[in-house]
């Protein structure tokens, strides 16, 4: 799985995110936690990353805190039989031992709701990720270029 994480970082670099970053704490690595710059006045934003678990047992991301938003929740995109994608909150995201889980558009992701201020490209936004059983890890979200999506109108 280490190879996968390196390939992911390589892909991010080729996609114009040459400043991809990661945070490693013991056996957990959070790879390029980022938020695409929301439009001016946005009330919410989505965050993405990969999380690698090099440990011998599964871990679970159960929450994230940051002064950048009043509420931060974990979500999954579910595609209904009608073909419509809906965002559904999840209680946690499991990262099996020796695996890497990617949080990306159209799948698992993080929603920051009630933004407390503007998020500008190049900013670094401090956050605390809470894992079971590992505990908290300090992480910074990088604000990447805008993706053009208005996440405040996506029915979260």
Image (cartoon, rainbow, N blue to C red):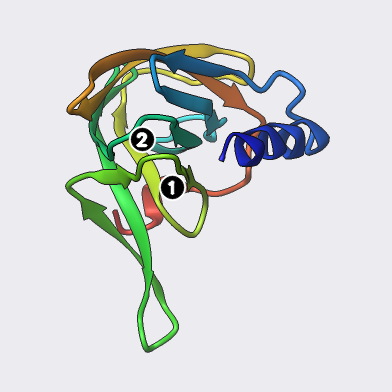
Residue drawn where x is 52% and y is 34% of the image: 38
Counting residues from the start of the chain, the first of labels 2 and 1 encountered is 2
Query: What residue is pinned by disc 2?
Result: 43
> Which of 1/138 is in front?
1
Q: Quadrant of the N terminus?
A: top right
Q: Secondary structure at mark 2?
A: loop
Q: Which mark is residue 151?
A: 1
Query: Taking 109 as reference, is 104 left or right?
Result: right
Q: In the shown orientation, is residue 21 left or right of residue 90? A: right
Residue at the image position 37 percent from the left and 88 percent from the top: 81
Residue drawn at 35 percent across, 80 percent down: 80
Decide which of 73, 147 is in the foreground and name it: 73
Structural crowding at the residue carrying mark 1, measured as other residues with C-alpha within 10 Å and reported as few (<14), some (14–19) or many (≥20): some
Give the residue displayed 63% in from the left and 42% down from the top. 4
Residue 156 vertical position relative to residue 3 in the rendered view, above or below: below
Q: Residues within 10 Å of mark 2 (few under 14, many from 20)?
A: many
């Amino acid at each position: 799985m280490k190879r996968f994480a390196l390939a992911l970082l390589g892909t991010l670099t080729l996609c114009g995110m040459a400043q991809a970053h990661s945070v490693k704490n013991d056996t957990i690595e959070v790879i390029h936690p980022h938020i695409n710059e929301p439009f001016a006045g946005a009330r919410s934003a989505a965050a993405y990353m990969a999380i690698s678990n090099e440990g011998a047992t599964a871990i679970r991301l159960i929450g994230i805190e940051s002064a950048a938003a009043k509420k931060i929740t974990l979500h999954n995109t579910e595609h209904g039989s009608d073909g419509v994608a809906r965002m559904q909150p999840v209680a946690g995201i499991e990262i099996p031992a020796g695996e890497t889980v990617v949080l990306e558009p159209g799948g698992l992701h993080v929603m920051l709701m009630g933004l407390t201020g503007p998020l500008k490209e190049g900013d670094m936004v401090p956050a605390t990720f809470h894992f079971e059983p590992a505990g908290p890890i300090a992480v910074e979200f990088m604000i990447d270029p805008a993706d053009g999506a208005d996440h405040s109108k996506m029915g979260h």
